């Protein structure tokens, strides 16, 4: 969300986002960059009214100007777009480290989200992802800038980023990081507010083991939250899998057939993880809901 | 790496006598006696105790024999496994070169102490006093089922001359890569192609099949297994792993060129100039088909000898 647009920023807390990525980069024209930097602290306050985590997307070309404007208490992550080298990330880490010290933020609080959007970045993905302990999630290069850099159309009806996605996710797995990205779904329209596609993609991504997603339009927030949250039926099923596996284990067996499905230690681990994830989602929803109610009540009082 | 016909690798829990008996009659090119995932902790000693006899039994039915070890228990598992008739070991969960070097070193000690060498291809005869060559070292198959293992595949392969084949193992399960709406397993296309490229670049055999999410890979039924094998062969694999004896036949069938394919290849080979890539591809297919037929014959001979 462009940080220089007060209409967007002031309503950001109502959106039910788990995180808000306030932008100093592509959505802000050059003439507005200074103004945008001056709006970061206001945006943090607005976003936190809905209990969203606050990310700030900076410009890869101006880290020395953007990072001091972006690192304030309440910021969870600095999103670094078009990452191309490990050296860029190490420089960013050093800037953040100094600002945490000066501004009284506990060391290591501010994470780095390195986004790969160029072919050089894809080629250097491992170096980028392993350049700082502040990086705890990583994914492959896709999207508008990646398409532009590769000289290809973005919405073509097939996955032209198979290699990038695979490379990014494999690196995340190799480094023990959270995998970012999504399951490819055919989209030839490029409609960023397509709620129907958004929920399908979120569900598919969750079922493929992914947990996060981003978007450019408020329409996709609710579908994404829904699609990335396990359903009640899935949670019940996961409990059945765990009970079934416990019985197997008791009998000294390693796998068994449960209603035509093979259940083994991997299925049991997935079931356990699903239950835990469902509980985290419920907790997060409650947290956001309580924050929004409190903010609404305060506004009523003021009026 | 070319030379062995290993279309079907049947994994069988080493403690389970019924499954062992089933494996002996399965016609698998390779039987993998398992000491890892399919063996409950409470059954490990029993499984290790079975290995020596099971190697001999499987070999007698014309299968090459590997043992899948638990990387955390590798010493005890190898001590239980390095006996006459063993062709190699499968190591899952590898994440660093030291693990491969450690396995190599234990194998070297046990080969020396027990006078064990890798047996000749099934059906071949080698005299006991033939000089021992490097090709008789027991093999290592790396089952690259972790993210780290896949990423570092090249270094892991180079860590030991014994590494002759690699697979993704149960990567979809260990790495938690699940099904997509398309029916493919998430990231499998990328991972399989990466594995095939690296294996060929380093002259080791890539083992695997083009499993779909809906057939849950290693326990798929006949038709799904056959299709996975056919697609796998087209993608560059020459054999795949399976968990049930009923999957052996579709794997052997799918990894063997069909009569139509051979006939088409013969036509191409006759028509195209010998230096053309098309003739080369056709020639490879014909040669592979003949190797598969030879493998089938050698199994029949060994089985017939046993039954006499």
Image: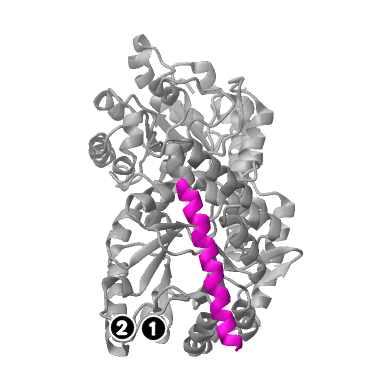
In terms of depth relative to the viewer, which is nearer, A295 or A64? A64
> Disc 1 marks which residue?
B82
Report the span colored magenta.
B283-308
Q: Which x, y percent locates residue A189?
A: 61, 19
Mark 2 and mark 1 residues within 8 Å of each other at the beta carbon: yes
**Chain label for disc 1:** B
Q: Residue at x 53, y 77 (%)?
A: B62
Q: Is residue B119 left or right of residue B228?
A: left
Residue under the point 36% across and 28% down: A118
In the displayed structure image, the side of residue A102 where residue A182 appears, left or right: right
Please report the residue visible at 31 percent of the width from the left and 84 percent of the height from the top. B110
Q: Quadrant of the C terminus of chain B?
A: bottom right
Q: Is residue B40 visible?
A: no
Q: Is residue B110 above or below residue B213?
A: below
Left or right of B204? Residue B212 is right
Task: Find out whether residue B301 is within the magenta segment.
Answer: yes
The residue that disc 2 covers is B111
Q: Image quadrant for the N terminus of chain B?
A: bottom left
Q: Give how far across and how far down residue B174 sits, in percent.
A: 50, 60
């Amino acid at each position: 969300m462009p940080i220089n647009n007060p209409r967007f920023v002031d309503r950001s807390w109502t959106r039910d986002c788990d995180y808000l990525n306030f932008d100093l980069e592509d959505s802000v024209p050059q003439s507005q960059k200074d103004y945008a930097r001056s709006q970061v602290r206001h945006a943090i306050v607005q976003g936190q009214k809905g209990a969203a985590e606050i990310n700030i997307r900076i410009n890869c070309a101006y880290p020395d100007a953007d990072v001091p404007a972006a690192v304030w208490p309440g910021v969870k992550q600095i999103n670094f777009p078009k990452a191309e080298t490990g050296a860029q990330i190490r420089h960013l880490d050093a800037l953040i480290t100094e600002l945490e010290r000066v501004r009284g933020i506990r060391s290591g609080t501010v994470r780095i989200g390195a986004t790969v959007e160029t072919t050089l970045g894809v080629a250097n993905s491992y170096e980028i992802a392993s350049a700082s302990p502040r990086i705890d999630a990583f994914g492959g290069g896709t999207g508008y800038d990646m398409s532009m850099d590769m000289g290809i159309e973005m919405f073509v009806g097939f996955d032209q980023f198979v290699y990038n996605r695979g490379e990014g996710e494999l690196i995340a797995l190799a480094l023990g990081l959270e995998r970012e990205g999504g399951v490819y779904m055919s989209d030839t329209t490029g409609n960023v507010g397509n709620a129907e596609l958004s929920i399908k993609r979120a569900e598919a991504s969750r079922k493929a083991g992914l947990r996060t997603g981003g978007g450019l339009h408020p329409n996709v927030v609710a579908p994404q939250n829904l699609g990335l949250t396990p359903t009640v039926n899935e949670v019940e099923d996961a409990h059945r899998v765990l009970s079934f596996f416990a019985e197997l284990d008791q009998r000294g067996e390693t796998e068994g057939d449960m209603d035509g499905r093979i259940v083994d230690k991997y299925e049991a681990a997935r079931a356990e993880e699903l239950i835990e994830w469902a509980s985290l989602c419920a907790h997060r929803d409650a947290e956001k809901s309580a924050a929004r109610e409190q903010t609404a009540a305060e506004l009523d009082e003021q009026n | 790496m070319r030379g062995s016909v290993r279309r079907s690798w049947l994994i069988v829990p080493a403690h389970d006598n019924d499954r062992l008996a089933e494996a002996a009659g399965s016609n698998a090119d390779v039987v993998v006696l398992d000491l890892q995932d399919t063996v409950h902790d409470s059954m490990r000693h029993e499984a290790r105790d079975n290995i020596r006899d099971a190697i001999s039994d499987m070999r007698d039915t014309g299968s090459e024999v590997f043992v899948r070890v638990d990387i955390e228990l590798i010493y005890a598992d190898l001590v239980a496994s390095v006996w006459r008739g063993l062709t190699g070991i499968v190591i899952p969960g590898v994440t660093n070169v030291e693990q491969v070097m450690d396995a190599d070193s234990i194998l070297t000690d046990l080969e020396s102490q027990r006078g064990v060498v890798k047996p000749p291809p099934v059906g071949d005869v080698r005299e006991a006093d033939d000089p021992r060559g490097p090709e008789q070292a027991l093999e290592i198959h790396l089952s690259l089922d972790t993210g780290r293992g896949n990423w570092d595949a090249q270094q892991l392969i180079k860590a030991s001359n014994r590494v002759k084949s690699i697979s993704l193992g149960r990567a979809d399960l260990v790495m938690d890569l699940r099904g997509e709406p398309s029916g493919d397993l998430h990231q499998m296309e990328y991972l399989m192609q990466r594995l095939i490229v690296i294996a060929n670049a380093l002259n080791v055999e890539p083992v695997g099949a083009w499993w779909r999410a809906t057939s849950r890979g290693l326990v798929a039924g006949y038709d799904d297994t056959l299709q996975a094998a056919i697609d796998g062969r087209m993608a560059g694999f020459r054999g795949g792993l399976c968990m049930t004896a009923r999957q052996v036949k579709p794997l052997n069938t799918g990894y063997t060129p069909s009569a139509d394919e051979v006939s088409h290849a013969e036509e191409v080979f006759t028509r195209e100039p010998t230096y053309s890539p098309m003739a080369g591809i056709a020639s490879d297919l014909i040669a592979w088909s003949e190797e598969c037929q030879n493998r089938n014959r050698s199994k029949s001979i060994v089985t017939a000898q046993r039954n006499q």
